[in-house]
Image (cartoon, rainbow, N blue to C red):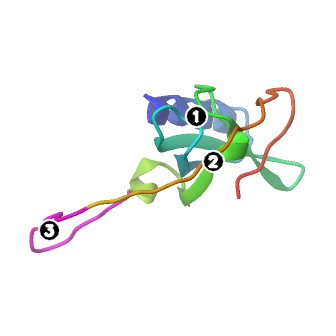
Amino acid sequence: MCRDFAHLSIALLRALGDPARLAAVYAPGLSPMEFHAVCEAMVDDAWWVVDATRLAPRQSLLRVATGRDAADTAFLTSFGAPVGLTALEVTAVTGQFELDDPSRLTRLR
């Protein structure tokens, strides 16, 4: 769902002639913690986060990958022989996140 909203935001911004790109992020402020997709828009020569879902505080987002769309930001791409996943562990320590003020611009780390 978040990827659909990110793609829609990107398409609308680009239709207005504004540069936009997709950012795959990890969102420890999401409940439960999970990977997330957001849009970044170029405003005054800087990239700013646009999260149409508002599911996680933007200050908590950690960049994993950036690209034109989801095809550029895949978490795993395998060519050739099959790949088997034998283990996966993600650990994050979180505290209280400040409330996200949607009227303020926020940048990804």
Which residue position is annotated with label 2?
A: 61
Q: For the residue labelled by badge 1, is the local secondary structure a helix, a strand or a loop?
A: helix
- Residue 53's x, y, as percent? 58, 25
Mark toward the start of the polypeptide (3 vs 1): 1
Residues shaded magenta: 75-87
91 left or right of 96 in image: left
Please state which of residues 1 and 71 is positioned toward the viewer in this rendering: 1
- Within the magenta stretch, is there residue 84? yes
Image height of 107 relative to 9, above or below: below
**Amino acid at the residue labelled 1:** Ala
Please state which of residues 6 and 19 is positioned toward the viewer in this rendering: 6
Mark toward the start of the polypeptide (2 vs 1): 1
Looking at the magenta stretch, what is its main secondary structure? loop
Which residue position is annotated with label 1?
A: 11
Location of the N terminus by quadrant is top left
Mark toward the start of the polypeptide (2 vs 3): 2
- Residue 43's x, y, as percent? 84, 46
Q: For the residue labelled by badge 2, is the local secondary structure a helix, a strand or a loop?
A: loop
Count residues near mark 2 (Cα–Cα under 10 Å), then give few for <14, some for 14-19, many for 20+: many
Residue positioned 72% across, 38% down in the render:
97
Which numbered disc, 2 or 3, marks the residue closer to the eye?
Answer: 2
Residue positioned 66% across, 45% down in the render:
60
Which numbered disc, 3 or 1, marks the residue closer to the eye?
Answer: 3
- Residue 75's x, y, as percent? 38, 58
In space, the residues marked 3 and 1 are separated at their CA atoms by: 33 Å
Residue positioned 45% across, 57% down in the render:
91
Location of the C terminus by quadrant is bottom right
**Amino acid at the residue labelled 2:** Leu
Which residue position is annotated with label 3?
A: 83
**Amino acid at the residue labelled 3:** Val
